[in-house]
Amino acid sequence: MYRQGEKADQSQDVRNSGVLRSWFNRWAWASYANYDKIEKELVRDKKNYSLVKHHQKHKGEPAIIVGAGISLEKLIPLLRDWKGVIFTSESMASTLKYYGHQPEYICLFDANQTVWDLFFEGYHWKGSTLVTHPSVDVKAIEKWRYDKIYYIMMHFSRLQGKLEQEGKTILEIERVIKDQLLGFDFFENILPVVYSFIGASILNAGCVVNNAIEVANFMGYGPLFLSGVDFGFKDWIHRYPQVKKVKGRWKKDDLRVVKHEDENGEIVDGIDISREIIIGDNGMPTTDEMAEYKLALMSVYKLDRPQLIDCSDGIITELPKADIREVVKQNGKGFEDRFKTDEEIIRCADAYFDTRKTVPTQ
């Protein structure tokens, strides 16, 4: 019926290379188009918009990282009661605003040129800080009138596996290497030099949630509570319904399910996500893409070692758990019994990596 387990058909290197290739031209173009605006803000106007200025500034302050999974429904009624800060994506910001807690940090990672028109136009965002990088939508950088935090997106290009040299000329080998190392100079040499006044780099970790974890941890926030970070379709529900303004009026999306085959072999109509559905290790439907997001999350967990506590209902089963209702009631305090040492975090991540072997590409 569906492929079982959180295993990808591609290696992570191959997948990352594909993502890089599909977005590289846009990232490079936006980085140059945004330069004058960002340089003016940070250098000429001397605004404290660099992530470096916020390093460990919020040590020990709890924060909630909000995703778009249906388990967010547990937090929504409690938003007005949460006294801490929230990090979320641009696509969920208006939903949280509508339900009573305008997010303190809106993380814009996507370089799509429709971002401003879809998620920012028509709202007042005073009190929110845009967390972003020079390679995103030019319109968003230009039009955002409130506080910002900039970082440089870090992306490492690597050779993918053994290079077959027999029978190839030097020029042919050179072409293969250059093809696999697309973006090497741009991300590792050019961006850090051109945007040296930003200073801080954040590893491209696949999705907004993972990048938000990196940024929040760098700023000192912790523990970090994950809400709506499902990386899967609980009860086959696609995502928590967005609420946004359409021609000045609030409009709620309908609850929608993912098109799937039920246990009797009947097709349940819904959103065709155009991706192969797999069943996660805990029995929840997901996709290769979201399983890769989980893999990236576990990589961030091992590298940065934040105190992550999961309050979601998705495919993440490896992290300490908490009820988001208790988190809000206690204002994020009193969860030290869920904290992990660095050694425990590394063991947890490594255990997941050991069980998540790549399926060879056919």
Image (cartoon, grey):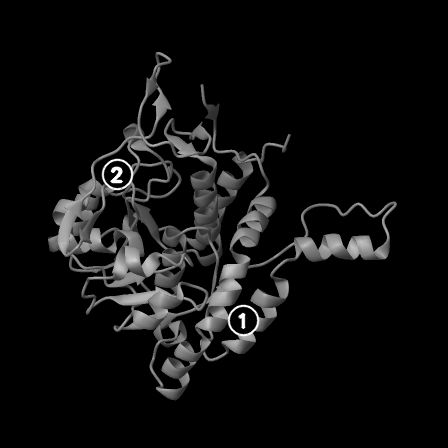
- Residue 191's disc is 1
| Viewer-closest of 150 and 170 | 170
Q: Going from the N terminus, do you reach mark 2 or mark 1 first? A: 2
Q: Is residue 64 above or below residue 70?
A: below
Q: Position of residue 122 (x, y in %)?
A: 20, 62
Q: Amino acid at mark 2?
A: Ile
Q: Residue furthest top?
A: 264
State the residue at coordinates (29%, 39%).
239
Res. 91 visible in picture: yes
Q: Amino acid at mark 1?
A: Leu
State the residue at coordinates (49%, 76%).
195
Q: Position of residue 136 (x, y in %)?
A: 42, 63
Residue 175 in the figure: left or right of residue 336: right
Res. 87 visible in picture: no
Name the quarter where the N terminus is drawn.
top left
Identify the residue position indicated by label 2 in the image.
Answer: 70
Q: Is residue 181 above or below residue 240?
A: below
Q: Is residue 63 above or below residue 262?
A: below
| Viewer-closest of 75 and 62 | 75
Name the quarter where the C terminus is drawn.
top right
Q: Nearer the viewer, mark 2 or mark 1?
A: 1
State the residue at coordinates (49%, 56%).
303
